Amino acid sequence: MKTPMVKRHGVAVLLVLLLCAYLFLVYNGSFNSASRDSNDTHTGQHDQLRRLIEASVRVSKPQPPPVLQGYSGIIDHKPLRMHCETCSLVTSSGHLIGGGRGPEIDRAECVIRMNDAPMARGYGRDVGNRTSLRVIAHSSMQRVLRRRQELLNASQDTVFIFWGPSSYMRRDGKGLVYNNLRLMNQALPNLKVYMISWPKMLQFDELFKNETGKDRKISNSWLSTGWFTMTIALELCDRINIYGMVAPDFCREPQHSSVPYHYYEPRGPDECAMYISHERGRRGSHHRFITEKRVFANWARTFDMHFYQPDWSPPPLPANQTLEVGGAKAAPLVPQNT
């Protein structure tokens, strides 16, 4: 028979074993709980990081440029997608020669040129060496095609926009300019060639009438490539730096400088003589260059537009004067989407 002392000792050992077992269970449960909490924390952090990465990817993923309605591809008829924060709009004026603005022009995100104005032949120092967009009149198409190597073959990243009267741009086989453009684009399939739709052309006419109070057809004149280019730039660019465009009253100044109308035709007509003769013209094909420049000066009071080479800014209007050109209050400056 066991003594009371032995019994008490056995009970004590049993209590110690039970206590150790209890502590082990408590510790193990706490560890597992902590482990689960840790795993849950790591899982939550992982999910949160994954969501942040996915959101970052969505934000940083390049978004397609906005659609510019009214400009359709020659081959696929798709609308133009393009946008630029800063643009250098380079005219064809003789004022550009000797300015050395080429590097400054090329620093813009997009460089816009007109018709067949060249960059080669040593002109790059003054007019730059890049072209993002070239706006071309129907009457300049043959000159562009004759200089295919310089203006087309070396311009795979350039967007070309052609404009012309509806009879030349029709797509039923009778549009002479459209047919030539289609053949050109088939021969050079990598070129980005667009044309201005006829509804869009009507909007350009309406814009001119709203801004000037003059009906282009009644006044027997044509909008210039400069008009199309400037208005397209307003749709395309957040900021426009214009190079080589004189102020509206420049040619009235008694001591104004004489420069060629085109910088690449040094023996061509004088610029101011060309502007004045066209402005006064009543018969035949002519442009309203000076009237258009008055509109551009007014637009520069509203939009982020700046003139260089020569450098000038439109004077502020008197406090009691509304923004007007030719007696007509300013209408929306960018044509509405078709």
Image (cartoon, rainbow, N blue to C red):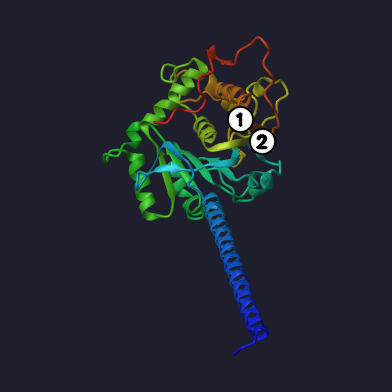
Q: Earlier in the sequence, mark 2 or mark 1?
A: 2
Residue 95, numbered circle: 2
Neighbourhood count class around disc 1 (C-alpha, 10 Å): few under 14, some 14–19, many 20 upward:
some
Q: Quadrant of the N terminus?
A: bottom right
Quadrant location of the C terminus in the rendered image: top left
Q: Is residue 296 above or below residue 22?
A: above
Looking at the image, which residue is at 54% across and 18% down?
330
Q: Amino acid at mark 2?
A: His
Give residue 197's position: percent from left, percent from top.
38, 34
Mark 2, residues whose alpha carbon is within 10 Å: few (<14), some, or many (≥20)? many
Residue type at mark 1?
Glu
Please tell me which residue is depicted at 38% across the width and 50% down the height of the picture. 184
Q: Identify the residue at image location x=62%, y=26%.
A: 300
Q: Is residue 185 visible?
A: yes
Image height check: is 255 above or below 184? above
Residue 213 — which label?
Answer: none
The answer to which of 181 and 89 lies nearer the viewer is 89
Given the current orientation, which residue lies at the most extreme bottom position?
A: 1
Q: Residue furthest left?
A: 172
Answer whether labels 2 and 1 touch (C-beta < 8 Å): yes
Residue 111: x percent and y percent? Answer: 58, 44
Residue at image mark 1: 271
Q: Nearer the viewer, mark 2 or mark 1?
A: 2
Element under label 2?
helix
Q: CA distance from mark 2 to mark 1?
A: 9 Å
Residue 40 vs residue 69, the one in the foreground: 40
x, y percentage for residue 82? Answer: 49, 43
Whether 120 is drawn above or below 138: the answer is below
Q: Which residue is nearer to you in this view: 85 or 219?
A: 85
**Residue 276 at what x, y percent from top left?**
58, 22
